[in-house]
Image: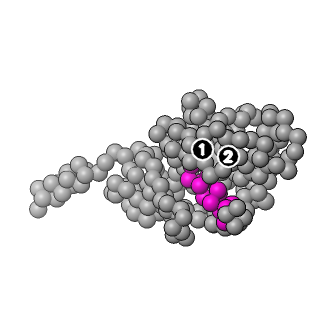
Amino acid sequence: MIFISLILIFLTACNRQENITLIYYHSYGSMLISPFQIDMNRDDVKLDDLPYANIFAGTSIDFNLSLNGNLNEDNSCIIYYSGISLGNVGTKENCLKYLNEIEDVYINSYNIEDEGQLTSYYLGNYNGVKIIFIKDKNYVRENMLDIISDVRINYYNKADNILAFYDNTLYSLSKAYDDELLDKNDLIFIKNMYNLCAISEKMENNYD
């Protein structure tokens, strides 16, 4: 009996991978928002501090993560997220402190004269790097697709731009990645927060 138990323990240990796949799924189950996944070292994932749980800390966005699975045994787990709902993003009023701070730097950096041409959304804080999605009608995007470390970001509008803000300086996502301010998992998460905000904006404006 002891021998069989040892065999079972050994087999379980062999099947337990060092990395774990976390699949993030919008809790409302909207077909407009696809699940996305990140891979992490299992030892870096804690039940009481799930990855990206605190990206909206300091705002009034009630961003919640709920785990479905066993972090110690399963090779993949589902994490449901809520707090940002389609058709009612509401990030402007919920994140005014951060948005105003970053917008001021953006306006000064790019000599924006008509602030009414700007619409911005806060996509979270990633280990001290704040991410903002700005729709600037003065800006015309040349490429509607960005590929950074195999992460493909498809922009919905030529006026859309995602920028990183760190140490009072604005960075493109690619520059922030190259400077190791962001990693690949951050890019995956940012991409999907942008998708949710962009789709929500389209819904609020009747897809105009």
According to the picture, the residue beneath numbered tag 1 turns out to be 144
Q: Amino acid at mark 2?
A: Lys
Where in the figure is residue 114, as x and y percent of width and height? 87, 45
Q: How is the image coloured?
A: one colour
Where in the figure is residue 66, as x and y percent of width and height? 51, 64
Q: Residues within 10 Å of mark 1 (few under 14, many from 20)?
A: some
Against 46, residue 180 (above or below) is above
Where in the figure is residue 169, as x and y percent of width and height? 73, 33
Q: 119 or 66: nearer the eye?
A: 119
Q: Is residue 66 among the parts visible in the rendering? A: no
Q: Residue at x 62, y 60 (%)?
A: 199
* Gap in angstroms between the C-alphas marked 1 and 2: 7 Å
Dot 2 lies on which element?
A: loop
Q: Residue at x 44, y 61 (%)?
A: 78
Tell whether label 2 touches label 1 (CB within 8 Å). yes
Q: Amino acid at mark 1?
A: Met
Q: Which residues are magenta?
A: 191-203
According to the picture, the residue beneath numbered tag 2 turns out to be 158
Q: Residue at x 73, y 49 (%)?
A: 135
Q: Is residue 33 among the parts visible in the rendering? A: yes
Q: Residue furthest right?
A: 113
Q: Residues within 10 Å of mark 2 (few under 14, many from 20)?
A: some
Dot 1 lies on which element?
A: loop
- Which quadrant is home to the C terminus? bottom right
Q: Residue at x 34, y 45 (%)?
A: 18
Task: Please state the total of marks drawn on the protein image.
Answer: 2
Upstream in the sequence, badge 1 or badge 2?
1
Q: 23 or 146: nearer the eye?
A: 146
Where in the figure is residue 154, as x and y percent of width and height? 56, 48
**What is the magenta segment's predominant secondary structure?**
helix
